[in-house]
Amino acid sequence: MASSYVLCNNNLFFPPSSKNGHLSITPPTKLQFQRTPFVKASKKQLEIVYDPDERLNKLADEVDKETPFSRLTLFSPCKINVFLRITNKRGDGYHDLASLFHTVSLGDIIKFSLSPSKTKDRLSTNVSGVPLDDRNLIIKALNLYRKKTGSSNFFWVHLDKKVPTGAGLGGGSSNAATALWAANQFSGCVATEKELQEWSSEIGSDIPFFFSHGAAYCTGRGEAVQDISPPLPLDIPMVLIKPKEACSTAEVYKCLRLDQTSKVDPLTLLEKISRNGISQDVCINDLGMNTQNQLHILFPFSLFGIYSYFETCS
């Protein structure tokens, strides 16, 4: 939450347009894999080629015979904190926050296919270091959906990861919201999006935001989401700077000193943005210095801070 830095000269990216601002659907089509011969033979040699994709496609085709809707590809956007105020430490160990969350056009692509298995989901990804078991929020979300609805669907899921991990951009939370939404589509939308949003807070504080319309004032642990009209034009460029080092949100909060945070009323910040748009004085992040301390590096700019850079270059 604290280690991604934003340089902006009045603009934010939005994800591709959709009904709810958080998911972009492509028509359900069959996943296409490159086919390779299973056996190559000649007089001099015999080469056995194991092709798991061929097997997966055949199994998916068997599933297709039983259901008219078995595959889905979704866009899973990340978010930034236009401002982030930490207002209190709670008795349960969490902190109360007040923040303006905003989706941006950077995001992951997730492919869902119904699995013939009735016992286990299968997750794959294009990057290393991402857990593929029930530590992953995608798997947690699918388990949560089955628990809440009694659904018997299990899935093959492929995560094409573009959002950096440990960046405070909410990539994992967005993936979880996307998985809940996808599972509901496969089940005929038996749950409302409001229910999905409420359930999602059980596995992550930021997840409910990704059921908003793209911009929201979030309070509590982050799970109390109030939709607002997008305060900024949609075509304004942004620069995200992600240090090479990953940053643990839990460790940043652990090091937080409330006596060193801003005292500005977050509702005042929200009002200024709604009235005047974004400016450096409203882009306050109470976790910024804690992030720098945790990473043991000093950034040569303040969080959300170099508007003069763009003004000079424009």
Image (cartoon, grey):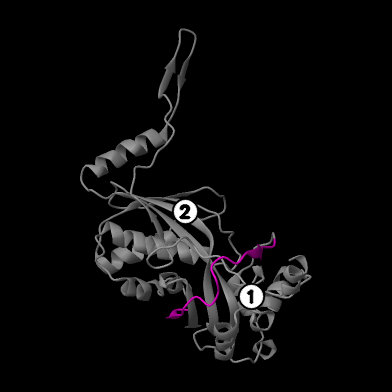
Give the image location of residue 148, x and y in percent.
Answer: 28, 69
Looking at the picture, does residue 160 appear above or below residue 40?
below
* Of 273 and 71, the residue lying toward us: 273
Residue 271 visible here: yes
* Of 151 and 18, the residue lying toward us: 18
Give the image location of residue 66, x and y in percent.
Answer: 20, 45
Give the image location of residue 34, x and y in percent.
Answer: 44, 33
Q: Residue furthest front?
A: 314
The range drawn in magenta is 221-243
Looking at the picture, does residue 112 appear above or below residue 301?
above
Residue 221 visible here: no
| For discs 2 and 1, the disc positioned in front in the rendered view | 2
Whichever of callouts 2 and 1 sits on the residue coming sooner in the sequence is 2
| Residue 237 on the magenta span | yes
Q: Which residue is mark 2?
A: 109
Spatial CA span between label 2 and label 1: 28 Å
Q: Quadrant of the N terminus?
A: bottom right
The residue sitting at 47% across, 78% down in the picture is: 229
* Of 83 and 21, the residue lying toward us: 21
* Of 291 and 77, the residue lying toward us: 77
| Residue 101 on the magenta span | no
The residue sitting at 61% across, 69% down in the picture is: 248
Give the image location of residue 36, x and y in percent.
Answer: 43, 27
> Looking at the rendering, which quadrant does residue 298 occupy?
bottom right
Q: Quadrant of the C terminus?
A: bottom right
Q: Which residue is mark 1?
A: 252
**Dominant SS in magenta:** loop
Query: For mark 1, does the 10 Å Cα neighbourhood hold few (<14), some (14 to 19), or many (20 or more) residues?
Result: many
Q: Amino acid at mark 1?
A: Val
Looking at the picture, does residue 300 appear above or below residue 270?
above
Q: Helix, strand or loop at disc 1?
A: helix
